[in-house]
Amino acid sequence: MLSKSLGGKRGSLVAILAIYIGLLLVAYLNSPNLGNFGITVLSGLFQGMLLFLVAAAMSIVFGLMDVLNLAQGAIFMIGAYVAYDAQHPGGVIDLTAVVPNNDVRFIVALALGFGAGALLGFILERVFLRPLYVRPIFQLVLTFGVSLILIELAQIVWGTTPNSWVEMFGVRENFFVLFGQRFSTYRLFVVGFGFVLIIVIGLLLKRTRLGIIIRAGVEDREMVQSLGINVKAVFTLVFTLGCAVAALGGAVAAPFLGAAPSLANTYLLTAIAAVVLGGMGSYYGTAIASLLVGLAVAVAQDATIGTSLGVLPSITPLLLLILVLLVRPSGLFGSSR
């Protein structure tokens, strides 16, 4: 069994490497200029990390609780609105007078976005989801309904007009030059933030006592409860953390994407594709799959410029998903549970 598992992981790594090399080769052949190639690669990393900020939370909740939360996209949207409001004057949450420094206010905006997601996650799990853990279909219907309600509430509170981010701060207004091309430093910030998130949450789940309790509770709930550990409280914490991470992702994405009701659905379907592609329940698989999808979309966008194939980038994640699942039905790092 061990050798079979190692062989499966080795095969997945080889497949990932082959796909990455193939995508990079296509990107370079389509734009032999190093500047254009750099733009495509950086755009792929950036899009992959934006996708990961939604997919990571979904992967955490599903991997540890077997709950596929279809409200993650709406919570991502709420995080973007909260951060936007905190940074700009005249909104529901206006901190411009209390925190006049734009850089400090942006940090506060991220914290508020994280807090808003945590509050929504806590209420959703404690009030609505807890009675439905034994009824997975009802969970899907419920979280989908919550998503629709949050979108409607956002339109009531903030209106239907998309809000573009205009209040600049240090990282957002600076640029750097690579291969003769000018890039926003904020793209690097998002990529770096995503990598830090991958490491921090991975260590939390794999190396801490809390992570051990969470994984043990998933495998044998009764045994963990017999040790005097409140498994229900642990599951509430996991779900709250997952929603908080999704809202934090929206807050981080807001300076680039703005805040709009459409954000609730922009990354949801692609995030589900990344979770399935990486392997249902595999956190690191989701991270790798998100970067893979981001690069594939960027390459497709570059390749279809000036052609009639403008729909190709939007269907690229699903095409990649189909390609991988034909070879590995459980995803790149998934188990056949």
Image: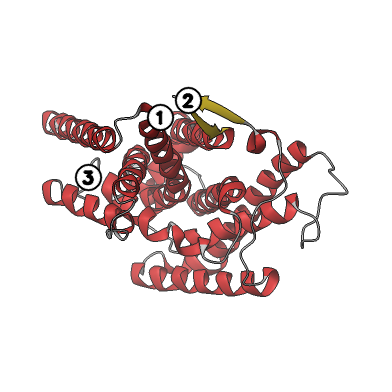
Q: Which residue is mark 1?
A: 35
Rendering colour mode: secondary structure
The part of the image, by quadrant, that contains residue 27 is top left
Q: Which residue is mark 2?
A: 178
User: Label 2 near label 1: C-beta < 8 Å?
Assistant: yes
What is the x, y in percent for residue 146?
Answer: 52, 71
Q: Residues within 10 Å of mark 3 (few under 14, many from 20)?
A: some
Closer to viewer: mark 3 or mark 2: 2
Q: Does residue 78 sit above or below 5 in this rendering?
A: below
Label 1, label 3: how far apart the Cα atoms are: 40 Å
Q: Report if residue 89 is visible in the image.
A: yes
What is the x, y in percent for residue 272?
Answer: 35, 56
Q: Quadrant of the image for the N terminus?
A: top left
Q: Does residue 54 sit above or below 169 in this rendering?
A: below
Amino acid under label 1? Answer: Gly
SS for callout 3: loop
What is the x, y in percent for residue 310?
Answer: 32, 59
Amino acid under label 3? Answer: Ser
Residue name at image x 46 percent, y 30 percent: 199
> Looking at this view, is 195 or 218 the one in front?
195
Amino acid under label 2? Answer: Leu
What is the x, y in percent for residue 278?
Answer: 29, 44
**Disc with the residue nearer the chain's start (1 vs 2):** 1
Label 3, label 2: how far apart the Cα atoms are: 40 Å
User: Label 3 near label 1: C-beta < 8 Å?
Assistant: no
Q: Residues within 10 Å of mark 2 (few under 14, many from 20)?
A: few
SS for callout 2: strand
